[in-house]
Image (cartoon, rainbow, N blue to C red):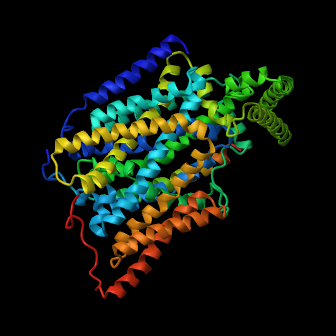
Amino acid sequence: MNEPITKLDDEQPIAHHYVMVLVVEAVTVFALWLLSRAFL
Amino acid sequence: MHPIDWAILVGVMAWIVYDGLKRTKGRDELEGYFLANRSIPWWAAGLSVMATQLSAITMIGTTGQGYSSGMSFVQFYFGLPLAMVVLSLTLVPFFYRARVYTAYEYLERRFDAKTRSLTSFLFLLQRGLSCGVIISAPAVVMSIILGLDVTTTAFVIGVPAIVYTVFGGVQAVTWTDVKIMVLIVGGLLATAVLLVVGLPDTVGFGDALHLAAITGRLDTLNFTFDLNQTYTVWSGLIGGLFLMLGYFGADQSQVQRYLTAQSLHAAKHSLLMSAYWKIPLQVLVLLVGILVYTFYIFTPAPMLFNRVHEERVARSERAGEFSQLQQRFDATVAARRAAAQQVVTADTPESQAAYLKLDADLQAVRSEAATLVKETSGDRNYNDANYVFPTFIATQLPIGLIGLMMVAIILAATDSIAAELNSLSTATVIDFYKRYVKTEASDGHYLMVSKWATAFWGLFASIVAIWASELGSLIEVVNRFGSYFYGSILGVFILAIGWRRANGTGAFIGVLGGLGLVMYAASTGISFLWLNLVGAVGVFVIGMIVSEITRAGSGEPGTGRREPGTGSRA
């Protein structure tokens, strides 16, 4: 069961996820701000 | 509750325990029991990370927060996505490649045994006690709703977790987490839909949100820079970033979730799932609370959501006062409903002002009633908001969904406890038993000790939970004290990675010094989110200075850090 981690796919690009995470957060925060204004 | 709801509650609980016990793959080996032989797919590890963080306190307390104050609490999580990105770039690769069982094991390879033991001990102290609170807080609320006593409810929450964690290990913990997350999110979405459908025909979803917005419940962002205010954009982004770095990067209960992932890539993805979904999930939980508020504008609501307290006060010698409050409450509720209808049909500044005044009057009556409860029952910590969502479920949802939502709340506590027990057992066995007591033994021996350690922590948590209500403010102190540790534990990991010349003495003294700084900062009254920043920076700076002094004193050259995997392995 303790096989070496041959499945390690560390080289797969993941950097775009880091950017996307921050973009999604910025969009979510903007949407929340919009929500508070839109229904006033 | 209807017998059908009880049947659903018992049936789902039994199925979760049975399914957890079925997870036998690899659990006869230590790595299988604690790390699932690193075979868990990213999405399951990711859901487990989220489920561990989402306890029953979230389901009850956060919906209550949405009901009473609105959306502003979500700022608490603004630092989380950034923390996940930072961890994926820094600590996660270190932990994963070092093939460690616990985060603290890495500290011995980098520094020395005493630094590892100190941080692991702080984790055990903090998490062991908080486990009791995770059981007791929802047990107090759910016992009122289910009509059971607190001890029985605590056992209903705790025993299933103990059973499937002892026998199923981390596999059981992870796969039950997955099912429970699906149940919770599905239940919350169904409840949100029913809350909208339950509005009067003349009131639309937009109208309901408008009523919430004019009371300030949709106000999310507070840009005030005030260290004493708990929820601001800055405390969430900066203090929250350090809290989340500490929680997800240095707390074994979370680290162990992603160490089970089948690759480093999968471990990073499991954290990124929280980065993408945690804020939207919290928005959903808070929105449900806000929709409960709008629902009760048009549907008769109890003056107090804890019916047991209400009945007790009504029978006490202050029943007359309570009855007068009830009359004021009924009249204000009717007037507020009419004012709300007025806002919906003719939205003018005058109609909004009339509504806001009646809404404030209603809060004032409720506040007086809550004070009466505190004085009559002696329950000084009574918070009516915690009973809003469970009472709404029990009295307003259709048969079937009541049972599902009740079991979702209970299981939210159960799965958090299970993950905590699993990690407490891992730290106890790997960082202490295997390190100091019996360094060489078979996997079977360590496995047996691990099961006993899990059972021990389960028993410990249950005892703390049962006595928690009697310990009252002491538990609160202990819990707050526990939250002081995150920044300091995080600081030692930052020192390990960020200062090549740091040594064991510097790290050890840095942790103690950082804890002292946090205690001092806490006494000045600044918001707890900033304490994480104080702790992390304090440990780093003190550790750096002490390392340089001791290094100069011993004539030791700057050798740089040892790479993970090259040191001793406990």
- Drawn side of residue B406 relative to residue A5, left or right: right
Residue in the picture at 33% in, 51% down? B427
Q: Determine whether, in the image, residue B152 is placed left or right of residue B266.
A: right
Which quadrant of the rendered structure holds the C terminus of chain B? bottom left
Q: Looking at the picture, how far across and down is residue B362, in whole percent?
A: 80, 34
* Image quarter of residue B546: bottom left
Which residue ends up furthest to the front in the rendered image? B437
The residue sitting at the top extreme is B3
Q: Is residue B46 above or below residue B163?
A: below
Q: Is residue B300 visible?
A: no
Camera-nearest residue between B347 and B547: B547
Q: Identify the residue at image location x=54%, y=31%.
A: B139
Is residue B521 in sight in this rendering?
Answer: yes
Q: Nearer the viewer, residue B75 or B328?
A: B328
Q: Is residue B130 above or below residue B339?
A: below
In x, y percent, where is residue B182?
Answer: 41, 32
Q: Residue B526: image x %, image y %?
A: 64, 62
The quarter in which the N terminus of chain B is drawn is: top right
Q: Residue at x 47, y 51 (%)?
A: B126
Q: Residue at x 60, y 37 (%)?
A: B470
Above or below for B3 versus B487: above
Q: Is residue B463 or residue B209 the one in the foreground?
A: B463
How far from the left and from the top, in percent, is residue B455? 35, 36
For the residue pair B83 and B3, the one nearer the viewer reads as B3
